[in-house]
Amino acid sequence: KWLYIDRDGNYNLIMAINFKYTESTLINIQQYLSTSPNKIVLTGRTLTIPEIVTVSRKETKVLFTDDKKVLERVKKCYEHMMDDVKNGVPVYGCNTGYGAQASRVLIEGNKEEKVRLAQKVSEGITHVDVSVGPTFSKDVVRAAMLIRVNTLMQGVSAVKLEDLDKYRQLLNKNITPIVGQYGGIGASGDLAHNCRVMNVLRGYPGTKVIDKLGRESDAASSLKKHNIKFLRLDPKAGLGLVNGDNFSTALALLLAVDTLDLLLITSVLGAMVIEVLNGTNRSFHPLLANMRAHKGQKEVAELYRYLLSGSKLAYQEMDKHKRRPPGIKVQDAYSLRCISQYQGVNFEKIKRIFETITINANSVSDNPLWVTEDQVTENEKPWNWVSGGNFIAMHMVDVMDELRKIMTQTVKLNDRHLARMVNPNENNGLPANLSDPQAITRCAFKGVQIQSGMFDVYSTLLSMPVSTMFGVHEEANQDITSHALTSGILGLENLRIARYSTAQNLLAVAQAVDLRGGRKHLSRRTVPLYDFVRKHANYTETMFNKLHTINDLEKFSINDLEATFINTSGKAWQKKGELFALNLFQQASKRVPAYASFLKKNSISPETIKSYEDLQEIPCTDKKNYFDKYQLKDLVWDGKIKDKYVISSSSGTTGKPYYWLSHPSEFIQGAAVHKYIFHKILNIRKPTLLIVNFGMGTWVAGIYTFLSTYFAGDNKHPISLITPGFNKNDTLSILSNIAPHYKDVIIAGYPTFIKDIIEQSSYSKTQNLKYILAGEGISESWRSYLLDLTENKNMFDVCSILGSADAAFMGFETKQTILLRRLIQNNTSIKKKIFNEERTPSIVSFIPNYRFFEEQNSNLILTANRAMPLIRYNTQDYGGVCSYEKLSKVLKKEGIDFAKKCGQEHIPIYNLPLVYLFGRGKFNATIYAANIYPENVKDVLSDKKIRRYTTGKFILETKYSDKQNHYLLLNIELKESIKSNKKIQNMIGEVFVTKVSKINSEYHRVFEEYGNKVKPIVKLFKYSEPHLFSRSRLSKTS
C-alpha cells in the first residue's frame, strides 16, 4: 500500500507495502503472485504485481479510482498546461520541437492558433511509430498499457482522463494492439512501442489488433465495432502517452514472475537430481548457512532439507556422515554440494527485483511533468513544468540484465546435472546415457545431453549485460541510454532456452528415477513433480531398438541419426558393436536350433560366454560348416518359419542354390539407411525417380533396393520406383520417356551395366543423374569416368553400398569415405599402412546397431540380426576393419589433415568404424611374384584412349605356355559396334604397362627387370561373347 505522509504541508511518497518481498520466502512470494483480484482500481500509486499479472494474463476488469483528490489533480494539471500553451509559454513537447529540435518554439498567433499549433506538435510524435520485427505477446502489451494508464493517473503529466479511459476500454474489451519488439533504445522510454498503441487508438492505417480469440483485424474497424471513439490528440497528449518506460517495466515484471517459477521448479528438480545420483542431504546442514549468514543461502538450504527428507535414494545424514561403499566419493560434486551457495544469491536477487519493479510500475516516467502543490520547492509556485529524465529505463535494464544472469545460471546448473546423470563414471551406477539396461546402443539421452551443451553456450551469450552497451543517438541529444527492451528481448529468448533446459532435465531425472526402482524410493515432496512428468512423457527407449515397423520409420529422424554419427566416439561405437554381438549371441544360443547345435558340436557352453573377449574364442560360422549342415527351419528364430519373410536366393560354388530369409524389419532398417543416403549423400530433390537395374526375381540386390526405397519414401519426399532389372532397352526407354519428368533420377545397379547404359543414353548429358552401385568395387578413375559421362563434377553423386545374399545390407559409402578414397588412390604408402595392400579397396561405414564386423586372418567376420541370424559369420570377403582414429593418425603422419579436408568439402566427421573390402577372396593374378589386381585393370580400362572401345568387362588370368613360362592373359569385351584390331590391342597393352607401373610398385619392379615378358597378352572379344561375356552368365555370377 502507498501512504501519503504530511510533513510541513508537503506530501512525500513512501513505499509501505504490506507484502514485503525481501522478508518472504520464494514459495510465499509465488503464492502471493498467484492471487487473482476480481477487479483492479487504478490510483496511480497502489498497483501491485499480482494485479498486473492478472490483467495481463486474464480478464480482470480495470476501474479508475473515485478518489476526488486524484481525479481533480489529473484535471487540474491538464488545465494548467493548456493555459501555458494559450499564453505562449514555451513548454517542451507542447509547443516546441522534440529532442534535439527543442529550440524550435512554436507560439505564433492568437490563443486558438497557438493551441492548433500545439496539437500539430502532439500529432507529430507519430514519427517514432517504428516498431518492427517479432511481435510482443499479448500479456506484455496488456501489462504495458495498464502500467501506462496507472502512472499517468498521478496527475503530473497533463493528460486527460478521457484519453486514459480509451486505454482502459481496450483492456476491458480484450482488444490488444499488435506491437513489434524492435525499435526502442530505452532513452525517452519505449517511444516506438507506446506510439504504436497510441496510433491504434487513433485508428491509424496499417495498425492492427487481436481480439479475445486471437483473431487479427485492422485497428479502425475494431474500434468502431466496439464503440470506442478514435483518440484525438490535444497538446502534450502525444508526448504524454508515448514518453515512458512502461513496456520495459511490463516485460521485466513478466520475466521476473516466470523466472521465479523456473527457480522453484528447478529447486525441486535439483533435489531429485541429488536423489537419483545418491547424493547427501548433509550438504545443507544448518551449520554452513549459520557460518555464512546470507539469507538466500539459508533459505535454499532449508528448502532442500525439506525436499530431501525421507528419500530412500539420497543419504539421510543430518545426524552424521555415513560410510560409503568402496569407490564412492565421501562428498558430492560442486553442482550438488554447493547448490545453496549457488542459488542463494539468486533467491535474494529476485526479491529485490520485485521491489524495484513495484516502484517502477507506480512511478511517473514521462517528460515534462508539472509541479503539484505538495511538491513545490522553496519560493516555487505550483504548476510550473519540469523537464527531466524519468523515462530512462536504467532500473529496468538492470533488472532484466540480472534476470538473464539467473536464467543462465539455471541453464548451467541443469547442464552440469544432466552431464552427471548420463555419465556412468559419475552417476553412481546408472546406465550410460540413462539408457534402458536392455538397450543395445546405450544412447537414450546422449543427444539430449549434447543439446544441453548448445543451450549452455547460447544462454551464456544471451546473458551478456546490455546496460553498458549504449551509444549516442538522436542528433547527440540521447547520449546516455538504457536499451532496456533489448535486454528484455534477450531475456525472452534466454527464458525459452532455460525452459527447454529444465524440460530436458525433468525428462532425464524421471528416467533416472525409473532406473533406480521408481517413485516409491523418492521423497514424498518430490513425488508430485515426478508424477507431473510421467503424466506427459513415458519412460524412454532407444530409437535403434524400436526401429521395426513403418510407424517407427515415420518417427525416424535423419538429423538425429547424423548427430549420433558425429557425436559418438569411435571407442563408443566399438563398445556398442561388442554389446550388440554379445547380446545377439546370447539370444541365438537359446532360440536358434541350428546355432545351439553348432555350439554343442564345438563344445561351447553359452553360459560361459560373458564378455566380448569370450565371444571371440567361439569358432566362426560359414556356408560350409553351418548353412550346409542344417535345415532351413532350424536356421531361423525359434526353429519355426512362422513369420512373414521375403526370400531371396544365390548360387553356391556347387550349383546348389541357397535360400535366404529376411524379416520385414530388416527392410525398415534398410529404409532408414537409404533415407540417409538419399538425403545426406545424394541430396535428392523432389520429385525423385529410382531405376532398379539390379537383377529382380529372387536376386537379393533387386529385392533389397526395391523394398528399402519403397519404405524410405514418405509424404514429405515421395520416391517413384521402376524395376527394369537387366533389361537395357527398357532402361534406355525409361531414361528417354520417364526420367525427364523428375528433378533427380537415381540409377541403382551393377557398375559395368550402368556404364553400358549411360554410354548409350542421350539422357546422360543432363546433370540430375545420381547412382547407387553394388555387386563389385569401383576405382576412383571409374567414378570420375561415370561422372564425366553425365557432365557431373560432384563425386558424392556416386554412392556404393556393400551387400551380399547371405548378409544382405552390410555397409555404405559416406561423403567421408568417398573423399578418403580420392585422397589415397595414388598414395601406396598410406594404403600399405592402413590396409596392408597397395591397391585401393572399397571403403564403407557400418552402423554397429545393425551389423558388427571383425577381422580375422584378413577375412571379414560378420554378426547380424536377421531372420536367419549370423553369429561371427565368415563372409569369405578379403578385407578388414579400421577405426577413424587409426585412419586420422596415418593420414596425419603422411601430411594430410583429414578433418581439414572434410571441412573444405563441408563434410561432417563421423566416428563410425570403416570396413575395407578387396573382394570375395584374393581374386588377383600374379606374374613373377608381382600381384596384379582387378582394380589395376579397371584403371587401365577407364583411360580416355580406351574406354571408347570397351564395355569395362574383363577377365585377367595367369597362364602358362607349353614350356611352363607364365604370362598375363587379359580378355576384354568390346562394345557392340567395335571390331577387334591390332591397334586397340597394342594400345591397351601400352596403357597397361604405363598405368600399372605407376600404381603398383611390385609390377614396376618386375617390369624394369623383365620388360615385355610381363606385358599382358591382350585378347579382344565381341560384345556378349557367349563363353566369356554372355549377359545371362554375368547375371548369375554378379
Image: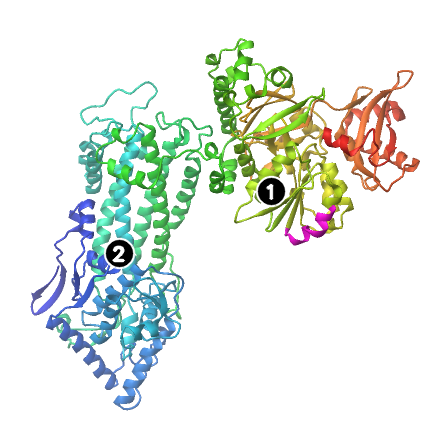
Q: What numbered label is drawn on residue 309?
A: none
Q: How many neighbours does mark 2 have within 10 angstroms: few (below 14), some (14-19), or many (20 or more)?
A: many
Majority secondary structure of magenta residues: helix
Q: Are marks 1 and 2 in contact (CB under 8 Å)?
A: no
Q: How many neighbours does mark 1 have within 10 angstroms: few (below 14), some (14-19), or many (20 or more)?
A: some
Residue 595 locus on image (x, y percent): 54, 17
Q: Which residue type carries mark 1?
A: Ile
Q: Which residue is under mark 1? A: 681
Q: Which residue is under mark 2? A: 253
Give the left or right position of residue 568, taking residue 161 as reference.
right
Quadrant housing the N terminus: bottom left
Q: Which residue type carries mark 2?
A: Leu
Q: Residue at x 28, y 86 (%)?
A: 114
Magenta residues (range): 732-743
Q: Is residue 833 above or below residue 812?
A: above
Disc 2 is placed on an element classified as helix
Q: Quadrant of residue 270?
A: top left
Give the left or right position of residue 589, taking residue 259 as reference.
right
Q: Is residue 59 above or below residue 293?
A: below
Quadrant housing the C terminus: top right
Considering depth in this image, is 777 or 748 the residue closer to the camera? 748
Q: Is residue 526 above or below residue 205?
A: above
Give the left or right position of residue 730, taking residue 1008 as reference.
left
Considering depth in this image, is 1026 or 615 the residue closer to the camera? 1026
Q: Earlier in the sequence, mark 1 or mark 2?
A: 2
Residue 889 on the magenta segment: no
Residue 563 seen: yes
Give the left or right position of residue 778, taking residue 481 as reference.
right
Question: Total marks drawn?
Answer: 2
Q: Residue at x 40, y 71 (%)?
A: 475
